[in-house]
Image (cartoon, helix red, strand yellow):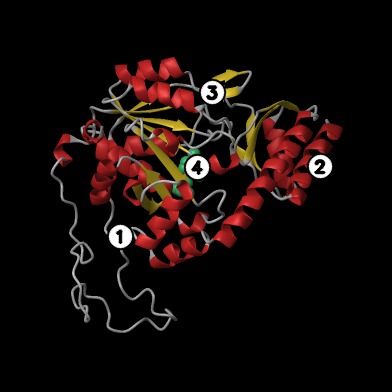
C-alpha cells in the first residue's frame, strides 16, 4: 500500500537525500565539536537550552503529538504550523506546470498560495451552498481531480470559513476513487470542535489519506507554530528530507510539551466544551437579528453569517472595538462575515453591537 503513495512523489525527488545536518548522523560522544555551536550559552538563555541545534524532529514532542492524535511516531511530520506541511506536500508531490492541487473554495487560502508558489495548477471545485451549509460536491471533486491530474486534494474539515465537517464516508469515497493518483489531505485544524471523528481512523485502510492537525486553534498555541501532518510512514520519510534542517525551535518544542501534559489537556478540553456552548449561543442570537440573512451551522470555533449590509455590520463592530473577518472577497461570500467564538463577555458585545445596528436602521 505504501508503494502507491510513494509513487506520488515527484520523480526527480525519488533519490533525493536532503541536507545532511550535524544532527543527521547518529553519533554519540561527550564533547560535541561538530556543528560550530558556541561553547557557552548566551546570557539571555537562562538555562542554556538553546545553545545547540535542536533535533529536527524532537522525539519527546513527536511522541506526545502521536499520542494526542492516536497514531504512531513514524506517521508524524511535525512542522512550523500545518502551513509548512501544506507547502511541503505541494513541493514534494507536484511537478510545476504538470500536476494539480485541488481545493474547494471558499476555503483556507494557503492551498492556493502553495500551489501558486510551486507552479502547480490550482483546480477549484466550489463548495455548494445547501441546506446543510457550504459542502463539497464529492462527485465533482473526483471528476475534476482525475481530469486535472491532481496530485493533492485538500478537504478542509471542518471547513474554514464554511464551518462544516466532511463526513468520513465522503473522505473514503474520494480516497478510493483516487487511489494511486492523488493524496487526499484532510485539514482538521478545527477538528477538536467537531463531532465528526478524525480521518486518521481511515488511514490503515487507505494509504492515500493524510491528516493535518495543529496546536494553533483549540490548543491556544498559535505563536508556537506547531503543526502536524499524519501520513503514510514512507511518505513522511520523504517529506522529512524536503523539510528545512532544524524546523522546530527548542523554545517552541518546550512550550508545546508543556501544553500537552494531562493537566493542560484537560483544561483545553474544558475550553473546547465552552467554545461549543458559546458557539450555539452566538448562532442562536445572530439568527434572531433582522440584519442577519443567514447563520451557517458550524463544527468549528467560528460562525459564518450573511448580512443585509455586511459593510455596515463590519463597521459597527469595528467602531465597538471588535475585529471580525470580512469574507466579502471570497467566492460566494459577498455578504458574509466570519466571527470567531470568544469568551461569553466578548460574544455578548458582538450580539449587543449587532442588535443596536437593527435599532438604527
Ligand atoms: C488556521 C488554519 C491552519 C493553519 O494552522 P497553522 O498550524 O497555524 O499553520 C490550517 N488550516 C486551516 C483550515 C486553518 O484555518
Between the residue at mark 3 and the residue at mark 2, the CA separation in whole angstroms equals 30 Å
Between the residue at mark 4 and the residue at mark 3, the CA separation in whole angstroms equals 17 Å
**Label 1: how many residues lie within 10 Å, few (<14), some (14-19) or many (20+)?**
many
Residue 210 location (% of width, % of height): 37, 37
Res. 34 mark: none
Res. 189 mark: 4
Mark 2 highlights which residue? 352
Residue 276 location (% of width, % of height): 67, 41
Quadrant of image for the C terminus: top right
Which type of secondary structure does the marked residue at label 1 adopt? Answer: loop
| First-in-chain label (4 vs 3) | 3
- Asked if the residue at tag 1 contacts the one at tag 2, i.e. Cβ–Cβ closer than 8 Å, the answer is no
Mark 1 highlights which residue? 56
Between the residue at mark 2 and the residue at mark 1, the CA separation in whole angstroms equals 48 Å
**Label 3: how many residues lie within 10 Å, few (<14), some (14-19) or many (20+)?**
many
Res. 135 mark: 3
Q: In this view of the protein, which residue sits in the foreground, 12 or 196?
A: 196
| First-in-chain label (1 vs 4) | 1
Which type of secondary structure does the marked residue at label 2 adopt? Answer: helix
Q: Is residue 266 above or below residue 178?
A: below
Whether residue 190 can be seen here:
no
**Residue pictured at 58% horizontal, 27% vertical:** 333
Q: Position of 179 compared to 216: left or right? A: left
**Label 2: how many residues lie within 10 Å, few (<14), some (14-19) or many (20+)?**
some
| First-in-chain label (2 vs 1) | 1
Q: Cβ(mark 4) to ligand 1 < 8 Å?
A: yes
Amino acid at each position: 500500500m505504501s508503494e502507491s503513495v510513494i509513487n506520488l512523489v515527484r520523480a526527480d525527488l525519488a533519490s533525493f537525500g536532503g541536507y545532511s545536518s550535524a544532527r543527521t548522523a547518529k553519533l554519540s560522544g561527550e564533547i560535541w565539536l561538530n556543528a560550530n555551536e558556541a561553547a557557552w550559552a548566551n546570557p539571555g538563555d537562562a538555562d542554556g537550552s538553546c545553545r545547540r541545534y535542536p533535533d529536527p524532529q524532537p522525539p519527546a514532542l513527536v511522541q506526545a503529538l502521536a499520542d494526542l492524535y492516536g497514531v504512531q511516531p513514524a506517521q508524524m511530520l511535525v512542522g512550523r504550523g500545518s502551513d509548512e506541511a501544506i507547502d511541503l506536500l505541494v513541493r514534494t508531490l507536484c511537478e510545476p506546470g504538470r500536476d494539480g492541487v485541488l481545493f474547494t473554495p471558499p476555503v483556507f487560502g494557503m492551498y492556493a498560495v502553495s500551489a501558486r508558489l510551486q507552479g502547480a495548477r490550482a483546480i477549484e471545485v466550489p463548495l455548494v451552498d445547501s441546506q446543510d451549509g457550504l459542502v463539497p460536491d464529492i462527485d465533482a471533486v473526483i471528476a475534476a481531480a482525475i481530469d486535472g491530474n491532481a496530485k493533492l486534494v485538500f478537504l478542509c474539515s471542518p471547513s474554514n470559513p464554511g464551518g462544516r465537517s466532511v463526513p468520513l464516508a465522503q473522505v473514503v469515497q474520494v480516497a478510493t476513487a483516487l487511489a494511486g493518483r492523488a493524496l487526499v489531505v484532510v485539514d482538521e485544524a478545527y477538528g477538536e470542535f467537531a463531532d465528526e471523528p478524525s480521518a486518521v481512523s481511515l488511514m490503515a485502510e487507505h494509504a492515500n489519506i493524510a491528516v493535518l492537525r495543529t496546536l494553533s486553534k483549540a490548543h491556544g498555541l498559535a505563536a508556537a507554530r506547531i503543526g502536524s501532518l499524519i501520513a503514510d510512514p514512507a511518505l513522511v520519510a520523504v517529506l522529512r528530507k524536503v523539510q528545512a534542517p532544524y524546523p522546530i525551535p527548542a523554545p517552541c518544542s518546550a512550550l508545546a510539551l508543556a501544553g500537552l501534559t494531562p493537566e493542560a489537556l484537560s483544561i483545553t478540553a474544558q475550553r473546547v466544551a465552552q467554545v461549543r456552548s458559546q458557539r450555539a449561543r452566538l448562532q442562536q442570537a445572530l439568527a434572531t437579528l433582522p440584519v442577519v440573512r443567514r447563520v451557517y451551522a458550524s463544527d468549528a470555533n467560528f460562525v459564518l453569517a450573511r448580512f443585509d449590509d455586511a459593510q455596515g455590520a463590519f463597521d459597527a463592530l469595528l467602531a465597538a472595538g471588535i475585529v471580525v473577518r470580512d469574507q466579502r472577497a471570497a467566492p460566494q461570500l459577498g455578504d458574509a462575515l466570519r466571527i470567531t467564538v470568544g469568551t461569553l463577555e466578548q460574544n455578548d458585545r458582538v450580539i449587543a453591537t449587532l442588535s443596536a445596528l437593527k435599532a438604527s436602521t
